[in-house]
Amino acid sequence: MADESKEMLDRLELDLVALKHEYDLFFNGKRRAEPMKERKDLETKLLVGSRRTIVGNADQLRFNNLSGRYWTYANLWTRTVRDLEEGRMRRDSGGNVRRVSGERGEPVDREQIDRAAEALLEARRSCGLAGDPSDIPSLREMLCARALEISASAGGKKVEFVVSVEGGKPKVKAVLR
């Protein structure tokens, strides 16, 4: 029974090393798709292994260590794939995954902010609300700050503001580009 546990642990360790290698190939652009089948197989083996009784303390410790390493890797892989999908990471010309540099352009064009501020002022006037041209600098500042927040939460995408009147009230909507 102890030999059976050691064999199972050896297989799990080899499978974990092989899965890590497959993910390394995927993140380096040498593999087209994420190795989901292999990951699911290893996860199933770990689940089955956790239901078995492992007699020796050393074997139990080794199993817990392997399981912990797998879940640490799984969280890293999930985060990296999510960052790729959401645009925080990109593939370079060699296919390798790289984090997008923090140097981004402005999240919104200054001219677009000026047009949106003026349109909002005009929408306020058309609704019978106070609308003074001296409000434009504060409107610009507010729109610019909001554009920075929205762009940061959207992975650095450009923001455009659309002004409309709904229900007798001026509305500003942000559109990601």
Image: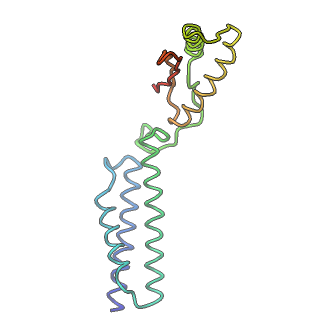
Q: State the residue at coordinates (32%, 72%).
A: 45
Q: Quadrant of residue 19?
A: bottom left
- On the image, the x and y values in percent for residue 159 come to 51, 24
Count of numbered circles on the image: 0
Q: Quadrant of residue 95?
A: top left
- Left or right of 75 on screen, residue 12: left
**Above or below for 160 versus 20:** above
- Left or right of 151 on screen, residue 77: left
**Above or below for 29 versus 112:** below
- On the image, the x and y values in percent for residue 118 come to 59, 10
Q: State the residue at coordinates (46%, 80%).
A: 62
- On the image, the x and y values in percent for residue 158 come to 51, 25
Residue 28 or residue 74, whichever sits in front: 74
Residue 7 or residue 46, whichever sits in front: 46
- Left or right of 72 on screen, residue 51: left
Q: Quadrant of residue 59?
A: bottom left
**Above or below for 92 versus 63:** above
**The N terminus is located in which quarter?**
bottom left
- On the image, the x and y values in percent for residue 145 come to 63, 27
